[in-house]
Image (cartoon, rainbow, N blue to C red):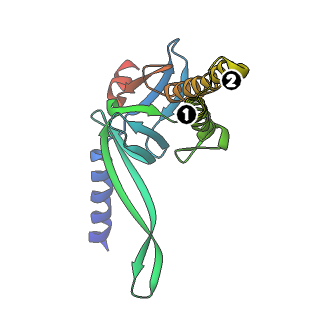
Amino acid sequence: MKKTILLITVLFCSLLTFSQQSDFIVLKKWNNRTIKTFYPGAFISGQTHRGFNINGFITAIRNDSIYIRQEERQLMGTEFGVELDTLVYTIGIDYREISRFNYTKKYKWGGKRGFVQVALPKLMMIGGVGFIILETVNTIYRKESFNDDGKLATLGIAAGVAVAGYLWEHMQENRNKAGGRFKVVYVKVNELKKAF
């Protein structure tokens, strides 16, 4: 009995001595107002400079790296058909590699909600450019003038719709980029303890 109590005490003390508190990352506006704080256990959604999507829970933050546990669910084939399988993996990346943080309420598990934010800007661009191409081909085929029946006005409206869709999508992409509307601050717990 004494040996087990001694063993449990030694293991508990070793956990206390070797445990390291994790650092954390703060998103701040340029006026130093905190937008969001990321710490171990928090959900993070974003995208790296190379286009890799990050959606998962933070397991640790240390040495300028974020360790994220991601889950991927997909149908896998078996001898009896298919079944839903979950792949869980942990990745570690440098926090400076993240170019976009999805931190607003519009994002749920990394994806934007709603038709308006996702498809409408692309449809505006495709519709505007498609109308311009179709009207130009028809006018040339019929050997008509572009000045007849207000064709230039309709082509201008179509071009305006396409440009508006492009600007809308461009503004949405730049909204959550690091260095744009906010800055990323890495806070080391050891330096924070020294300050107090």
Tell me the number on the disc at residue 137: 1
Q: Is residue 101 above or below residue 171?
A: below
Q: Amino acid at mark 1?
A: Val
Q: Measuring from the top left, give residue 147's x and y in whole percent.
A: 65, 16
Residue lying at the far right in this picture: please name it: 149
Mark 2: few/some/many CA within 10 Å (<14, 14-19, 20+) = some
**Which residue is at a point 54% across and 34% down the rendered structure image?**
103
Can residue 105 be seen in the rendering of this structure? Answer: no
**Which residue is at a point 31% across and 52% down the rendered structure image?**
15
Q: How many marks?
A: 2
In the picture provided, is 39 more to the left or to the right than 140?
left
What separation in Å lies between label 2 and label 1 (alpha carbons)?
14 Å
- Choose top left, top right, bottom left or bottom right for residue 80: bottom left
Q: Measuring from the top left, give residue 24's x and y in whole percent.
A: 41, 33
- The residue under label 2 is 154
Q: Measuring from the top left, give residue 9's x and y in whole percent.
A: 31, 59
Q: The C terminus appears in which quarter of the rendering?
A: top left
**Which residue is at a point 27% across and 52% down the rendered structure image?**
14
Q: Is residue 90 above or below residue 25?
A: below
Q: Secondary structure at mark 1?
A: helix
Q: Amino acid at mark 2?
A: Thr
Query: Which residue is more in the foreground, 19 or 84?
Result: 84
**Which residue is at a point 32% across and 74% down the rendered structure image?**
1
The first of marks 2 and 1 along the sequence is 1
Query: Which residue is more in the foreground, 146 or 176?
Result: 146
